[in-house]
């Protein structure tokens, strides 16, 4: 029953929502969908709680078993517990809670993102080599787009921004459409398998 | 000279050069002209073609990392919208702190300058959890979607603008979204603009920009701004240079530095290969 109940719940919910979407049940259907949307919002809140529990279990396990780099887990646990206590005592919009969020969490986020710029530069330098035709196409596209995205490109080669626009609009669009269509069909297939109970790995029981 | 070494320049040297090339133009701008792309022009025109007094929904769906690219877009949008006496209703779904705060700061700065009043000409509804469900509720009932309060918890009854904006379906003319991931433009497209047939435009971080092109071609996006370059182009169209244009010289120098290093790396690679072939 522990295995069947979640599968049954998923199937019933999915068929219910699909029926409401594909058939017109008038005002009753619209009200049901609106109610379901509110349920989704409530369920989402529970997912956060689940996330916090999983996070604690994982990092507590790392510390208790002294796994490699367990010190980082200590830092993560302290940060989570401290933030929770401060936010509960001070309130979500409290002075200390907002200060911590703006001056620690946000700054770390910005710094990590800024570091990516340097990593991209070094990765490009190390790996963009004209080794074969495919690498050549990639290299030429990258060079053209980098020149097209900066005003200096037009200053050196007038009109290069138009070439960049064409690369984005035509070959890039074609590729992206293929990827999106493929991913969309894949998502449909995976969803149908989950709804029909053929895919069960999410229950922790393997497929 | 041992050309092969060009492949193995100490990466710290590259980092220092990149850093200097980005910082120096900020203090000593070159002022290179920025060509306007078709996509940026479309964004400007779709807003310019709205009737005066229209309601624009602006969602600043950004995090701290990408904010410098996207903030200038919000400033320029506020300037163009307020010039046409358009009203702005704002949300932020990507980050609970940065999005709403930056949205407020950037619109407020322009609003103060142009004599526009909070609650009458613009409102910031802030962050709400679970964007998809919230958007779906707001399609027919904005007040219910945001719990009847703005980002500071002030009841919406206090704002004359919100008496006019009850549902996105009937009361909003255009949606402008900045995007760095999900939720972002795709969420708005799926749950709001496609079902309601509303125009959607905005801007994305440069890393996401290649992924939106086919939606522009299909007409699902009415143009889109790409990164800091897009913001700079939009500022130029609005006729008020700001942070976007001032960052362009740094971007130019950064890109040129990377290209120079790419060239050096490839020279080193070919020299090494020809040497190996000779041996």
Image (tube, coloured by chain):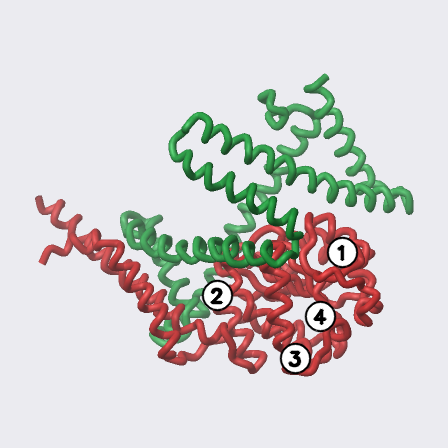
Mark 1: few/some/many CA within 10 Å (<14, 14-19, 20+): many
The quadrant where residue B81 appears: bottom right
Say which colour chain A has. Answer: green
Say which colour chain B has. Answer: red
The answer to whether marks 4 and 2 mark residues whose Cβ atoms lie closer than 8 Å is no
Residue A170 seen in the figure? no
- Cα gap from disc 1 to disc 4, whole angstroms: 16 Å
Report in which chain the residue with disc 3 lies: B
Quarter of the image where the N terminus of chain A is located: top right
- Cα gap from disc 4 to disc 2, whole angstroms: 30 Å
Give the residue pinned by disc 2.
Answer: A165
How many numbered circles are shown? 4
Residue closest to the eye, A128 or B20:
B20
Give the residue pinned by disc 4.
Answer: B88
- Cα gap from disc 3 to disc 1, whole angstroms: 25 Å
The answer to whether marks 1 and 4 mark residues whose Cβ atoms lie closer than 8 Å is no
- Cα gap from disc 2 to disc 3, whole angstroms: 36 Å
Q: Are marks 3 and 1 on the same chain?
A: yes
Give the side of residue B74 with respect to residue A72, left or right.
right
Mark 4: few/some/many CA within 10 Å (<14, 14-19, 20+): many
Q: Are marks 4 and 2 on the same chain?
A: no
> Any mark on residue B146, and which?
1
Residue drawn at x 79%, y 71% is B161
- Cα gap from disc 1 to disc 2, whole angstroms: 39 Å
Please, is residue A59 above or below residue B247 in the view? above
Residue drawn at x 36%, y 70% is B23
- Residue B258 placement (x, y as % from top left): 32, 61
- Residue B25 placement (x, y as % from top left): 36, 74
């Amino acid at each position: 029953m522990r295995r069947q109940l979640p599968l049954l719940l998923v199937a019933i919910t999915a068929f219910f929502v699909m029926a409401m979407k594909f058939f017109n049940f008038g005002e009753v259907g619209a009200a049901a969908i609106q109610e379901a949307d509110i349920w989704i919002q409530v369920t989402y809140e529970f997912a956060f709680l689940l996330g916090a529990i999983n996070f604690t279990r994982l990092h507590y396990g790392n510390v208790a078993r002294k796994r490699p780099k367990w010190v980082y887990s200590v830092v993560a646990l302290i940060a989570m517990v401290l933030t929770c206590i401060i936010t509960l005592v001070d309130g979500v919009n409290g002075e200390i809670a907002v200060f911590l969020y703006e001056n620690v969490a946000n700054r770390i986020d910005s710094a990590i993102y800024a570091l990516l710029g340097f990593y991209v530069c070094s990765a490009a330098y190390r790996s963009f080599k004209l080794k074969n035709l495919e690498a050549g196409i990639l290299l030429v596209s990258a060079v053209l787009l980098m020149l097209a995205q900066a005003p200096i490109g037009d200053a050196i080669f007038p009109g290069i921004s138009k070439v960049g626009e064409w690369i984005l609009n035509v070959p890039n669009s074609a590729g992206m459409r293929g990827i999106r269509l493929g991913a969309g069909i894949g998502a449909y297939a995976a969803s149908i398998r989950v709804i029909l109970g053929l895919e069960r790995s999410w229950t922790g029981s393997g497929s | 000279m041992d050309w092969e070494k060009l492949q193995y320049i100490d990466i710290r040297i590259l980092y220092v050069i990149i850093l200097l090339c980005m910082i120096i133009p900020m203090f000593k701008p070159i002022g290179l002209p920025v060509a306007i792309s078709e996509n940026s022009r479309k964004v400007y025109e779709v807003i310019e073609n709205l009737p005066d007094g229209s309601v624009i929904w602006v969602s600043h769906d950004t995090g701290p990392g990408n904010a410098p690219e996207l903030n200038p877009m919000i400033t320029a949008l506020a300037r163009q919208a307020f010039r046409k006496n358009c009203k702005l209703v704002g949300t932020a779904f990507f980050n609970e702190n940065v999005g709403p705060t930056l949205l407020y700061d950037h619109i407020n700065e322009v609003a103060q300058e142009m004599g526009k009043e909070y609650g009458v000409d613009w409102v910031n509804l802030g962050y709400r959890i679970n964007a998809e469900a919230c958007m779906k509720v707001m399609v027919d009932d904005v007040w219910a979607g945001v719990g009847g309060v703005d980002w500071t918890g002030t009841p919406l009854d206090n704002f004359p603008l919100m008496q006019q904006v009850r549902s996105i379906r009937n009361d909003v003319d255009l949606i402008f979204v900045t995007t760095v991931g999900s939720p972002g433009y795709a969420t708005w497209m799926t749950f709001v603009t496609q079902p309601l047939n509303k125009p959607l435009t905005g801007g994305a971080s440069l890393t996401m920009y290649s992924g939106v092109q086919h939606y522009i071609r299909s007409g699902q996006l009415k143009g889109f701004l790409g990164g800091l370059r897009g913001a700079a182009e939009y500022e130029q169209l609005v006729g008020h240079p700001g942070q976007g244009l001032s960052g362009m010289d740094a971007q130019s120098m950064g890109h040129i530095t990377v290209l120079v290093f790419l060239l050096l790396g490839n020279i080193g690679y070919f020299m090494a290969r020809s040497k190996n072939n000779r041996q």
